[in-house]
Amino acid sequence: MKHAIDLGHLPQLVRCNLGNNHVGSIHYRIDEWWSLLLINYEAQAELDERPYQLKQGTVILVPPHVEKHYQCDRSARHYFAHFRLRNSKQHSYHMPECFDTGDHYQFLCDTFHIMINAHAQQHQHAASIHLWHLLQRLADDFARIEDNNQVHPAAQQALEIIEAELSQNLQLPEIAERVKVSSNYLNAIFKQHFGETVYAYIVRLRMDRAHYLLAHSDLKIQAIAAELGITDLQAFNKLVRKHLGKSPRKIRESILH
């Protein structure tokens, strides 16, 4: 079964942590929040009586009011996040409630770990940003699966580097070296799979996230630029004007008014 998940606004993270599953049968329902779980054990699950086989790397994503039933043969732990969504219908994705993340398990674990630490330190907005990035990544990955588009391993690895290190000074030669292909070849397979060069992809991703942070956060503009790996505020302003049509200040003012 698929659920529509709207990522047009930053989600509101309510809680996240490592959860425990005990031996035997567990049954519960959450009526207020969406649930996102990353599983690292084998078990059987039923979501509103729909059966699933869980294993390491399985993601569960369900809206409120879904009956959850798990049957485990051993005690184990999983990552979880509970959150609220605002409905804008601007960027709505239809995603399965249970699916395998394949080779992305460690990346998702790392992102969950960062999010949990931010939440524990009461940096709630930062934690919600990490959750939004995680949901966006899952939505993008599933969209590629739906399109039956087998992404080249080097391109997939480059995507993971870019999304995990967007706040760093990303350079094409360094990324290409890390995924063990030439810069020209990496650009070529990016154009094949995504229709744009590596640099264009990085800029578009930064501008997409800049727009959301300007619209839905109270972070200072300089802090947003730093969050997106751009230390020169003038260069950030110029990029935003070029790609979004307005200065960062004008974008924020237009949202507020």
Image (tube, rainbow, N blue to C red):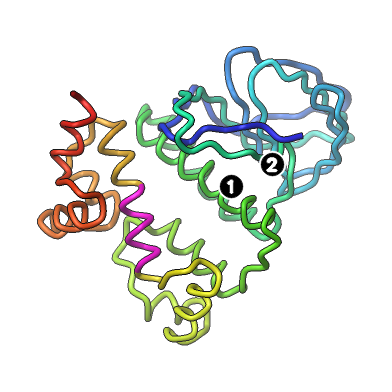
Q: Position of residue 29 (x, y in %)?
A: 72, 15
Q: Position of residue 60 (x, y in %)?
A: 70, 36
Depicted 216 relative to depicted 243: above or below: above
Q: Position of residue 80 (x, y in %)?
A: 61, 32
4 or 124: nearer the eye? 4
Residue 204 in the magenta stretch? The answer is yes
Disc 1 marks a residue whose amino acid type is Leu
Instruction: Tell me the crowding category of disc 2: few under 14, some 14 to 19, or many 20 or more residues within 10 angstroms, Cα based.
Output: many
Q: Position of residue 138 (x, y in %)?
A: 58, 47
- Give the residue number, with chain letter if any, for mark 1: 138
* Quadrant position of the N terminus in the picture: top right
At 21% across and 52% down in the image, what residue appears? Answer: 240
Q: Which residues are magenta?
A: 200-208
Disc 2 marks a residue whose amino acid type is Val
Quadrant location of residue 196?
bottom left
Depicted 18 relative to depicted 176: above or below: above
Say which element carries label 2: strand
Disc number for residue 59: 2
Instruction: Tell me the crowding category of disc 1: few under 14, some 14 to 19, or many 20 or more residues within 10 angstroms, Cα based.
Output: some
Q: With 36 as the anchor, is 172 left or right in this view?
A: left
Labels 1 and 2: the sequence-earlier one: 2
Contact between labelled residues 2 and 1, with CB atoms less than 8 Å apart: yes
Q: With 237 as the anchor, is 33 left or right in this view?
A: right
